[in-house]
Image (cartoon, grey):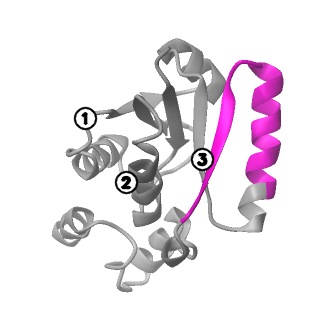
C-alpha cells in the first residue's frame, strides 16, 4: 500500500520551517501532497496562484511532492486523494496542544486517517507565516525565514 500524506496549510507564504518538514518527511512517504487550503472568507497576503508557484519551486527536486488546492475539511480532501496520513510540523508546546485537538477531531471524522507530527528544526522554531507577513508589512529582513526565490518575487512586486 502506498503511503500518501497531506501537508495542509495556507502557506501565506511558505517558510523555511515548512520546507524543512516536507523535505525530512519525503523519505517517510511515497507521496506528499502540499495542500493549500483555500478559505474565501480569509484575506491572504499573497494570491493562491503565487503561493502555489512558490511551493512548486521549493520542491522541484523532490519527485514525490506535489501541490494541490482544496476547500473544506482536510479529511475530506485526504479521502479524495487517497491519503491515509496528515503531516503536521510542531514548533512549540502550544502548537502541539492546538494540533492534538485538530488531530483528534479528524480521527473522529475519519478513523482511518492518521496524523503524523514532525518536530521543527530548532533554528526554525520562531518562524511562522504570520510572523513573516508582519515582518514584510514593516519592511524587515525576511531572508532567514523564507526561500530566496520568494524574497526576490516580493522585492519585485
Helix, strand or loop status at disc 3: strand
Residue position marked by numbered label 1 in the rendering: 63
Q: Which segment is the magenta one?
A: 97-120
Residue 35 vertical position relative to residue 90 in the rendered view, above or below: above
Using residue 148 as the reference point, say whether residue 81 is left or right of it. right
Residue 10 vertical position relative to residue 153 in the rendered view, above or below: above
Q: Quadrant of the C terminus?
A: bottom left
Q: Looking at the image, which residue is at 27% across and 47% down?
A: 59
Using residue 81 as the reference point, say whether residue 140 is left or right of it. left
Q: Looking at the image, which residue is at 31% across and 79% down?
A: 143
Helix, strand or loop status at disc 2: loop
Give the distance between the C-alpha atoms of the residues marked 1 and 2, in whole angstroms: 26 Å
Q: Quadrant of residue 20?
A: bottom left
Q: Residues within 10 Å of mark 2 (few under 14, many from 20)?
A: few
Residue 66 image position (x, y, % from top left): 33, 33
Give the distance between the C-alpha atoms of the residues marked 3 and 2, in whole angstroms: 22 Å
Residue 30 image position (x, y, % from top left): 41, 28
Residue position marked by numbered label 2 in the rendering: 46
Amino acid at each position: 500500500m502506498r503511503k500518501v500524506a497531506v501537508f495542509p496549510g495556507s502557506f501565506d507564504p511558505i517558510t523555511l520551517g515548512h520546507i524543512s518538514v516536507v523535505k525530512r518527511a519525503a523519505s517517510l512517504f511515497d507521496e506528499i501532497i502540499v495542500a493549500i487550503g483555500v478559505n474565501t472568507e480569509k484575506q491572504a497576503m499573497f494570491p493562491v496562484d503565487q503561493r502555489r508557484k512558490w511551493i512548486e519551486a521549493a520542491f522541484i527536486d523532490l519527485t514525490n511532492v506535489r501541490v494541490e488546492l482544496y476547500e473544506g475539511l482536510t479529511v475530506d480532501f485526504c479521502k479524495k486523494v487517497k491519503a491515509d496520513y496528515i503531516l503536521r510540523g510542531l514548533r512549540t508546546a502550544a502548537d502541539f496542544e492546538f494540533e492534538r485537538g485538530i488531530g483528534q477531531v479528524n480521527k473522529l471524522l475519519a478513523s482511518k486517517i492518521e496524523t503524523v507530527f514532525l518536530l521543527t528544526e530548532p533554528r526554525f522554531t520562531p518562524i511562522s507565516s504570520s510572523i513573516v507577513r508582519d515582518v514584510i508589512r514593516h519592511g524587515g529582513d525576511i531572508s532567514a525565514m523564507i526561500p530566496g526565490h520568494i524574497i526576490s518575487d516580493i522585492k519585485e512586486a
